[in-house]
Image (tube, rainbow, N blue to C red):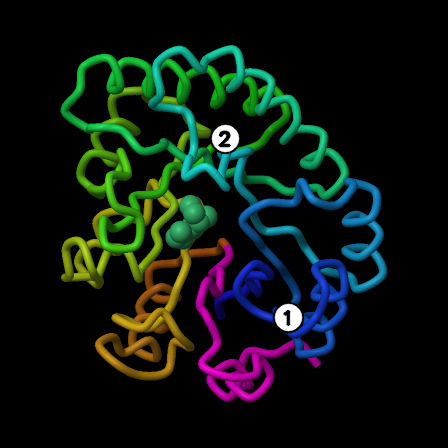
């Protein structure tokens, strides 16, 4: 049975950030993820995880200046020193939370620009190496261009090729089913092909990015397929609830921790 992680950036927004940990645990989640922990101290987050017996499934390395429109800096030439500092900052939070996987955002850059391509590869190789020393996986997530126009890593094939070329055991794919359906479709066949290099899965309805209980994808079928393929990682619930978070958890009832 999949282990679902509540995404505390999108879900449980009725509560302040730290209180979302309590709310997610009360709703039956055994794990959480979010985009960024950096607005709270590592100690405060560790305390919420411990007191609620929650696993920290995932978070992202710092993304650059998010408010200014940056969406990662890994593919941005001239930012390598900042990236190295970001890796250390994320590792402080990793040590406190016990997370075993971190997502590195690529940034807004032309995927056909040679400088961006070589810069991205250098950043990925460096970050994966540093995380390997701590037993942590580095994840790469292709993101669709409708949600993130101009994003460098906008193709699952590109991620698959890079992971194969680098040949680093802790470099893995973050398979967000929502993005895959929008970019490529054919989700089941892609899961079968890519699960062996997948370190984390995320879900949402398509096209609305709401609860995984309707619209274009049949998640009941996909959860069965993910189980059948032997996936033993987390599934991150990276969706925007249609209304109050708790009112939209009908789909989750069979999986809730009691
Ligand atoms: O946008 C998504 O999808 C994510 O998983 C975020 O972490 C941004 O990368
Ligand atoms: Mg995602």
Q: Which residues are magenta?
A: 234-258
When asked about the image quadrant of residue 115, the answer is top left
Above or below, 177 against 67 in this view is below
Disc 2 C-beta below 8 A from ligand 1 = no
Q: Residue at x 40, y 22 (%)?
A: 124
Residue at 50%, 17% in the rendered image? 129
Q: Position of residue 213 (x, y in %)?
A: 37, 82
Q: Position of residue 22 (x, y in %)?
A: 76, 68
**Going 34% across and 23% down the picture, which residue do you hit?**
75
Instruction: Indicate whether 118 appears above or below 158.
Output: above
Q: Position of residue 223 (x, y in %)?
A: 37, 71
Whole-angstrom CA distance, mark 2 to mark 1, is: 30 Å
What is the quadrant of residue 176 in the picture? bottom left
Residue 29 circle label: 1
In the shown orientation, is residue 54 left or right of residue 74? right
Q: Residues within 10 Å of mark 2 (few under 14, many from 20)?
A: some
Give me the residue at 21% from left, 30% from top.
161
- Foreground tag (2 vs 1): 2
Q: Secondary structure at mark 1?
A: loop
Q: Which residue is mark 2?
A: 64
Q: Quadrant of the C terminus?
A: bottom right
Q: Is residue 24 above or below residue 5?
A: below
């Amino acid at each position: 049975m999949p282990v679902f992680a509540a995404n505390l950036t999108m879900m449980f927004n009725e509560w302040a950030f730290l209180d979302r940990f309590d709310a997610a645990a009360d709703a039956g989640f055994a794990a959480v993820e979010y985009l960024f922990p950096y607005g709270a101290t590592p100690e405060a987050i560790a305390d919420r995880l411990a007191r609620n017996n929650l696993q920290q499934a995932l978070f992202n390395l710092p993304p650059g200046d998010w408010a200014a429109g940056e969406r990662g800096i890994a593919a941005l030439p001239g930012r390598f020193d900042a990236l190295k500092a970001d890796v250390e900052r994320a590792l402080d939070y990793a040590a406190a939370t016990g997370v075993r996987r971190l997502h590195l955002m690529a940034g807004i850059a032309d995927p056909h620009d040679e400088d961006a391509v070589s810069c991205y590869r250098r950043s990925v190789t460096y970050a994966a190496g540093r995380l390997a020393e701590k037993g942590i996986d580095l994840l790469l997530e292709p993101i669709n261009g409708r949600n993130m126009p101009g994003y460098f890593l906008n193709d699952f094939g590109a991620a698959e090729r890079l992971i194969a070329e680098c040949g680093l055991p802790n470099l893995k794919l973050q398979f967000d089913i929502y993005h895959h359906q929008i970019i490529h479709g054919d989700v089941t066949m892609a899961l079968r092909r890519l699960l062996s290099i997948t370190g984390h899965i995320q879900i949402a309805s398509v096209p609305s990015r709401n609860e995984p209980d309707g619209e274009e994808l049949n998640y009941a079928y996909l959860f069965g397929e993910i189980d059948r393929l032997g996936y033993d990682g987390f599934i991150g619930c990276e969706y925007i609830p249609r209304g109050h978070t708790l009112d939209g958890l009908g789909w989750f009832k069979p999986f809730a921790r009691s």
